[in-house]
Amino acid sequence: MQYKCCNHILGSIDLSFSGFKYCNEVWEGPEYIHYNVENAFQKNEERRLKIIGEMKNGIIPEKCKQCPMLEEKDWKEFDGKIHKVTIFNWKHCNASCFYCSVGSDYYDGVKKSDDYDSLPIIQKLIEEGRLNSESFIAFMGGEPTMLEEFPHILKLLLTKNCRIEVLTNGIKYEHIISEMLKAENYNTICISLDCGCRETYKRIKRVDKFDEVIETIKKYVLDSKDKSKRIKLKYIIFPNVNDSKKEIDKFFEICKNIGIKTVARAVNHHESKMDTTKNQAIETTVIKAYTYFEKQAKKLGFELQKEPWADAIIENKVYNCRKISPLTRLKSELHFLLKKFAKHYIYKVSNFLFAFEQANISTLD
């Protein structure tokens, strides 16, 4: 039957921030079914069937209308199979990236949010025969390797020959990831390095772990041997932070030196101020860096992984973006700089107050 729909509605599950969803956070999509709702998983699946029925009748969820994944074609009937599961770990992280949309809610690496365990959900999908070798499982959000159940889920998925991708900051080395990279299925790992030197790394990640990450990457490259194309290094571009040619060149130098063959680039939709309710600009330096990154990847012989949602943001095809005047872009960039300046000094003051408090505690002791 021909109607407007998308692959996410017809076979994806996101174990997201506090509930079930069909697509990752870049697209808004239908509302969550929260984990604390009784029989949340079953209700999410009932809602899927309801939305498919509505879409067949031309009724599109409001928050899906701007999504470029929406396509009108002759869709196959939903057969219950799940072709994609995205596991967002919003519970733990060993970094404190300034661009993280929930970073302000972290304390000592533990996310203060609704808690859930992904393992029983994956087990349920396998028991029901809804996951197979054609299913794709992605780990992201927070830091997957810090999840207690992470190695158990990975081992389980490997027995079913599901295709797996782990998005990680690379601070913690996991032997099970090396095993995953060696499997026959085309499993991949994507490490967001986002920089070309230690100082920029500390500025973005707000932890001093650059050397550890480089060593982790080297181990995965060595372990994967002839399958090293499965290891991708990602570069998320931020205005006035890492959007210079010099920083991008240093990133490619690192890739070359440690044997990376595949790279990915993106822009951060939070930091770029993209919002469904506003028509805001992306900084011109980000657009130029985005183009330069692709040019250098091709010139140096790296395989570049495409990020459709990032292309859509750059090309003003998503988030209600319109082509805007130079004056509006200038206003947006000035607003961004002022906001960034304020955040920088608030952060410095908070660090000073914390250090002062700790000094007083030490004195009392």
Image: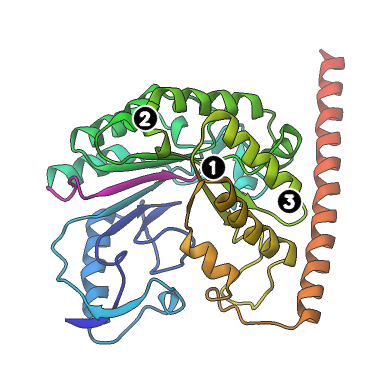
Which residue is the site of mark 3?
245
Q: Nearer the viewer, residue 31 or 322?
A: 322
Q: Is residue 282 left or right of residue 34?
A: right
306 or 170, which is in the foreground? 306
**Residue 50 in magenta stretch:** no
Q: Residue at x 46, y 67 (%)?
A: 28
The dot on residue 226 is 2
Instruction: Give the residue pinned by disc 1.
Output: 112
Is residue 260 something one can see in this rendering?
yes
- Give SS at disc 3: helix
Q: Residue at 72% across / 53% down in the picture?
A: 243
Q: Earlier in the sequence, mark 3 or mark 1?
A: 1
- Quadrant in the rendering for residue 157: top left
Cα–Cα span, label 3 and label 1: 38 Å
* Predominant SS of the magenta segment: loop
Q: Amino acid at mark 3?
A: Lys
Q: CA distance from mark 2 to mark 3?
A: 31 Å
Choose the circle earlier in sequence order: 2 or 1. Answer: 1
Residue 91 in the image, given as x and y percentages of width and height:
48, 40
What residue do we see at 56% from left, 29% from top?
Answer: 258
* Residue furthest to the bottom: 58
Q: Which residues are magenta?
A: 129-141
Question: Number of marks in the image?
Answer: 3
Distance from Cα at disc 2 to Cα at disc 1: 41 Å
If the image is split into quadrants, where does the N terminus sit?
bottom left
Q: Nearer the viewer, mark 3 or mark 1?
A: 3
